[in-house]
Image: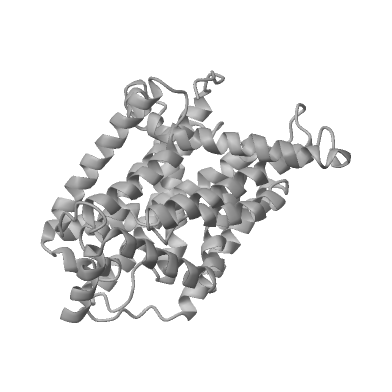
Amino acid sequence: MTQSLAPKTDRLVHLDVLRGLAVLGLLFARFPAKGGSSLVLEHPDVLGWSAGEQGLWLFNSVMVDDAMRGLFALLFGVSLWMMTGPREDRSLVPTWTGYLARTAGLFQFGLTFHVIALAEASDILHVYALAACGALILSRLDARLLLLGGMVGFVLLAAHDFMGDITTAPVTSAALAHAAAEREAGYLAHIMASIQNFQAWSLSTGIVWKCLEAGSYMLLGLGLFRIGFFTRLSNETLALITATAYGVGLAVCGGVAISLAAGGFMESVKAHFLTTLGKPFIVIAHAALIMLLMRGGFMRTVLTGLLAPVGRMALTLYLAGSAIALFAFTGAGLGLGPFDRYEITGLAVLGSLFLIVAARAWLSAFNQGPFEWALRIWSQKTGGFLVSILPGMRLQNA
């Protein structure tokens, strides 16, 4: 695990910082349901609804919820191209076979460590693994077609949400008691519930729409990287993209959130079709803003020091975040809480600081995280084996 790696380029530092932002952002998205109540997903007011708590929820709803997952998927598309794009020293079949072996390992990690060991049925790793297979097939299309494909994907998702029933169930004493009992259940009960929910969800059409969402972000990431979004844009262009994307995203997602909150959350904010259409603008704005901030000396130093180490260990720390949420807040571990929104936000800040310190400490001794290392070894061994039994299919200089 201490083999030397090639020095990182400026581009890769940008990507590490963005991945680090996504990892830490997921703590703020995860903690309310784990540390408060699962009902918070549809009824945010169950954790308290003072003016300050409303402000925290609105920020989280617009800037964090689903946006951090989307940022991860966008960067997944970028990494896909960096790993499999045409290069003189690469041939098509070994490269693609190795990448497919990597996605198979990612799927297995998600199932074994997240769904089972960490009792988190809503895992994104297996969704990304499945979506990446489709994105790989389309990856060498013209960049403009990839961008168009990503946009069409979100239109289809929005149409599905528009036709669906997003009415929320009322909050009752029985519902609150049931949510509390679920949170306070022991470790084995959490595991069994996670497996059952995963099976039910994976055998329904829900996984199709989750894969479409992840795949659409991946296509956007592929297309944006190939047109130079992450490498060649001027400060002025990045500033314009940031302002425009935030303007659209905040107006759409913020408008939906405020409107449904005023109506008492009779409908789900997360499942609203306008939220689906607005969230990619928030994701792109986050990416453009971070890259713009990285152009300044002071902010570059700060962001690189805080977020880049976390981004280099994104897989390991994504799983670590789930572990913290499970074992700190539920009956599987300490069973702390339930907390109100102020307390949960403070705990998410502390959790972020912990992950930053842990990442810096680990990388002072090793070049990559333990799960990153395991996934790399898996990919090399299984990909190499598959290529060795298909020698006649190698295409040079693809």
Residue depicted at 70% across the width and 52% down the height: 138
Q: Position of residue 120 (x, y in %)?
A: 39, 58
Q: Nearer the viewer, residue 314 or 190?
A: 190
Query: Looking at the image, which residue sits at the far left?
Result: 50
Colouring scheme applied when the structure was drawn: one colour
- The image quarter containing residue 340 is bottom left
Q: Position of residue 190 (x, y in %)?
A: 33, 62
Relative to residue 53, is residue 41 drawn left or right? right
Quadrant for the C terminus in the image: top right
Q: Position of residue 335 (x, y in %)?
A: 19, 56
How many numbered discs sit on the rendered protein?
A: 0
Q: Is residue 269 visible?
A: yes
- The image quarter containing residue 77 is top right
Query: Looking at the image, which residue sits at the far right?
Result: 392
Relative to residue 64, is residue 369 drawn left or right? right
Q: Is residue 282 visible?
A: no
Q: Position of residue 95 (x, y in %)?
A: 72, 38
Q: Nearer the viewer, residue 285 or 344?
A: 344
Residue depicted at 72% across the width and 43% down the height: 97
Residue depicted at 54% across the width and 20% down the height: 3
